[in-house]
Image: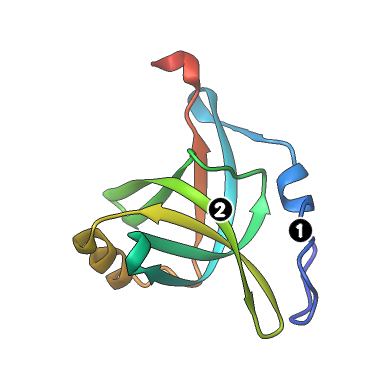
Amino acid sequence: MNQKSPNEQPADIKYFDALFVTHEQGQTMALFHVTHTFTLENRNLFFLAGEVVDGMIRAGMDVHLRVNSGLALKLRIHSIEFARREGGEDVCLGIESDPELREVLRGFNIAGETVEVVLEDEKKS
């Protein structure tokens, strides 16, 4: 895997041109590395900011956030946005949430984690 230098700008479209990786039980999967999180209270969104490590991510997919060995949360991606920061730009996965869920998610300290992003096989319904 190629490491980016801290000053290297992410390629805008390349992240979303990657092929899906097949995951267990007919799911498609991508990996997303979270560098930090933030909220936009006026839009009821909690954001995971970072970069796509592998695969392709789009709105409607689910972030699988492993809280501990026995508990994981499935969070639906509402929007994908970009945030400029000093030294670069982050891909931001917006999770629509109520104030209580945003508070819980802030408490998990997700920064530094790599999470799975999954699109369930639509035929499995």
Residue flagged by tag 1: what amino acid is it?
Answer: Asp
| Residue 73 position (above or below residue 42) | above
The kind of secondary structure element at disc 1 is loop
Q: Residue at x 79, y 61 (%)?
A: 11
Quadrant the C terminus occupies: top left
Q: Which residue does the image show at 41% across and 68% down from the upper left?
A: 110
Residue 56 lies, in percent from the top left, at 66, 43
Name the image quarter holding the N terminus.
bottom right
In the picture as drawn, the residue positioned furthest to the front comes out as 42
Q: Are marks 2 and 1 in contact (CB under 8 Å)?
A: no
Q: Position of residue 81 (x, y in %)?
A: 58, 58
Residue 35 on image: x %, y %: 54, 72
Q: Residue at the spot x=49%, y=39% of the render?
A: 61
Q: Amino acid at mark 2?
A: Ile
Which labelled disc corresponds to residue 80?
Answer: 2
Please say if 54 is above or below 81.
above
Calculate the distance from the C-alpha at mark 2 to the C-alpha at mark 1: 12 Å
Front-most of residues 54 and 68: 54
Query: Which of the 4 image quadrants contains residue 39?
Result: bottom left
Disc 2: CA contacts within 10 A as few (<14), some (14-19) or many (>=20): some
Against 58, is 28 above or below?
above
> Is residue 45 shown left or right of residue 90?
left
- Direction from residue 109 to residue 55 in the image, left or right: right
